[in-house]
Image (cartoon, grey):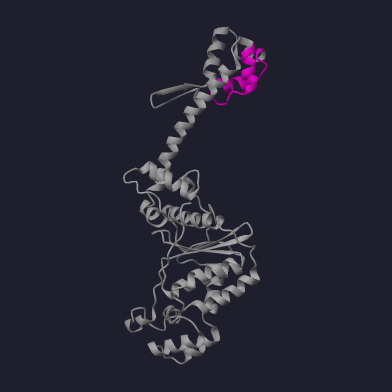
Amino acid sequence: MSNYIEYNDMIAFHPGYYIKEIVDESGLTQEDFAKRLDTTPKNLSLLIRGEQSLSIDIAMKLSRMIGTSVGYWLNLQNSYDALRAEFRSQEELMEERKVFDCLDYKYFKDHFGLPDLPRKINEQIKQVREFLNVATLSVLIKRDMAVSFRSTTEELTQVNTIKANTMVQIAVNEALKTDAPRFNKMAFEKAAEYALTLTRNHEEFYPILRETFHRTGVIFVILPNLLGSKINGATKKIGNNVMLMVNDRRLNADSFWFTLFHEIGHIMNGDYGISFERESGAREEAADQYAENALIPPERYQEFVRGNRFDLQAISDFADQIDRDPGIVLGRLQNDGKVRFDDWTLKPLRHKYKVKYNISRY
């Protein structure tokens, strides 16, 4: 560390710069000067090199020794610290720009009401930083910043990490603003069972689910997808509550309900974190199994499969029998290889949800 700093045509000297001048003019060695100052030679050396801030104690001793005011020395230290902080702030802003380049300001503007600031990159960064409630966007680079990153079958890039952390941060902030009762696992299990009765309620299911889960201490958030996050959902314990987030990347009935119950499975297993695409491992398999069995009773499904009839009418009839959206049955059959993904005769069974977001920056 230098005992002076230059930035934007300004220069500030560390108090050690002036202390060195005084020592040199005194004719004393640093060791002898340190003894007279009632400090250690090591402490004096650190001060002279600018590697240690000037303490009030040393400022007081200097003022007594050479007749200057305490304020004189403290002002030197404050001026140096202020310019150094400004320099670090600009360095940090350059690092933030690298993170911001991975994001799309339009996402925040369109979905969360951030102001339109064309070509004003620094101001856009400030707006996003304040919206996410972080000291610097650079924290979004860190794995497990807000929740655990569950193991994935493919390597996540830094861009994926930044975007995943961004979505989780938005969901966590929303949960922190929400007053909910203490999480009750038994009540949540019953709420999950009730949720299964809503799979065909295409227009009103979300507010009903949100309120039902809220009463059990689970704060349910659906977010607009941030392209490239590769995130399906996330869960996190927040105080006495649990945050449950999914995005709208796949809002067909089958994928939405499977993703939701996959995350519910993680909560039931006491396993909190982010779910990404194509994950593997025992925890993911357990959550998958929970979702499959909850959405379609296993014995009823095996009986249906043994019938080996998977046309539009058969699927619709089976969905009616188990009181599920037929798209859920179709998705399971496609996943199990019983019907082709490109069988357009079954397209009428698929339903695409639309969700209105009510999250703002305030």
- Residue drawn at point x = 61 percent, y = 64 percent: 217
**Relative height, residue 294 to residue 53 (above, below):** below
| Residue 60 magenta-highlighted | yes
Image location (x, y in percent) of residue 179: 59, 59
Relative to 36, 146 lies left or right: left
| Camera sees residue 264 | yes
Give the extent of the magenta segment. 36-64
Q: Main secondary structure of the magenta part?
A: helix
State which quadrant residue 58 falls in.
top right
- Residue drawn at point x = 46 percent, y = 71 percent: 256
Relative to 271, 226 lies left or right: left
State which quadrant residue 289 falls in.
bottom right
**Camera-nearest residue between 208 and 271:** 208
| Camera sees residue 289 | no
Image location (x, y in percent) of residue 312: 38, 87
**Relative height, residue 17 to residue 121 (above, below):** above
**Relative height, residue 177 to residue 87 (above, below):** below
- Residue drawn at point x = 33 percent, y = 79 percent: 342
**Camera-nearest residue between 225 and 333:** 225
Image location (x, y in percent) of residue 271: 59, 64
Q: How many marks?
A: 0
Relative to 240, 164 lies left or right: left
Image location (x, y in percent) of residue 295: 52, 78
| Residue 130 magenta-highlighted | no
**Relative height, residue 332 to residue 73 (above, below):** below
